[in-house]
Image (cartoon, rainbow, N blue to C red):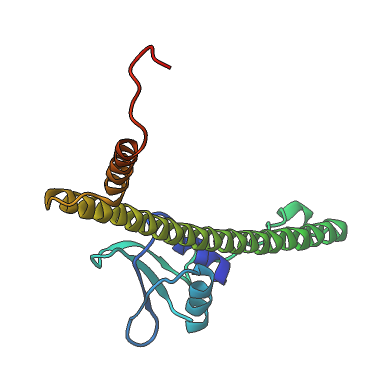
Amino acid sequence: MNPSRIRGFLLQLPKPALVRVTGEGEPQELKPGKSYAKLAETIAALHVDLVECLDAKGMVLRAVRLEAEESHRSDAADIPEALKSDPHVAMITHFANLIHRAYEHSTEVAFARLVEITDKMNDRSDAIEMRLERTEASNRRLLQDQVDDAFDRAAEVAEQAAAGGQSDMGQQIMGGFLQGALQGKAGAKPTPNGKG
């Protein structure tokens, strides 16, 4: 079985948490990573007979024998008995089989490439989302720090007011009021109404 068909088997839903492959020796367990294409290439390189997809609890989700009849590409169409002796029919049938094989191969390759592109786009989207989450968390921390600072300043002002002291602004207002009152008493006598 070629890697693209193994990959198609691995990508079926539900996706496996673990893949167990059995060949001539002991069964091996493979953990799927981000790229199912790489995992499929590894499985094809191991030349195993059985591939089992397991869930997180170790239960078998699905299995496939790689040497099974349905895992091979489709065979060429049989020529009817009445036409086997005709060389033109044999030539056309051979040509049709070659075209069939070419389309089958190109479809598999195109699908594998399309899936690789989709995987790369998904990885890029995941990276963008993680950066956005980090930026939002940083923004929330900065905003929380500003709110905490404002509360701390308000608490300091409240403590000063409770201790009997006035805030700097209140002291300035009272100082200005008293200064104006003192200057008015020290200056000219007030004139009664109506007198010039």
Q: Judge by depth and name the residue closer to the eye, 119 or 49.
A: 119
Question: Which residue is the extreme one toward the bottom?
Answer: 25
Number of numbered discs: 0
Residue at 52%, 82% in the rendered image: 45
> Does residue 75 appear left or right of residue 30 in this picture?
right
Q: Quadrant of residue 30?
A: bottom left
- Residue at 69% from the left image edge and 64% from the top image edge: 105
Residue located at (71% from left, 53% from top): 80
Q: Position of residue 92 (x, y in %)?
A: 83, 57
Name the quadrant of the C terminus.
top left
Residue 121 image-quadrant placement: bottom right
Camera-side residue of 67 and 52 = 52
Which residue occupies the foreground of this view, 149 or 110?
149
The percent coordinates of residue 118 (x first, y second) are 58, 58
The residue sitting at the top extreme is: 194
Please, is residue 177 above or below residue 5 in the view? above
Q: In this view, which residue lies farthest toward the right? A: 88
Q: For the N terminus, which image quadrant?
A: bottom right
Residue shown at the point (18%, 53%) measured from the top left = 160
Residue 71, position as x, y percentages in the image: 52, 65
Residue 26 spot, x, y in % from top left = 32, 86
**Image quarter for residue 195?**
top left
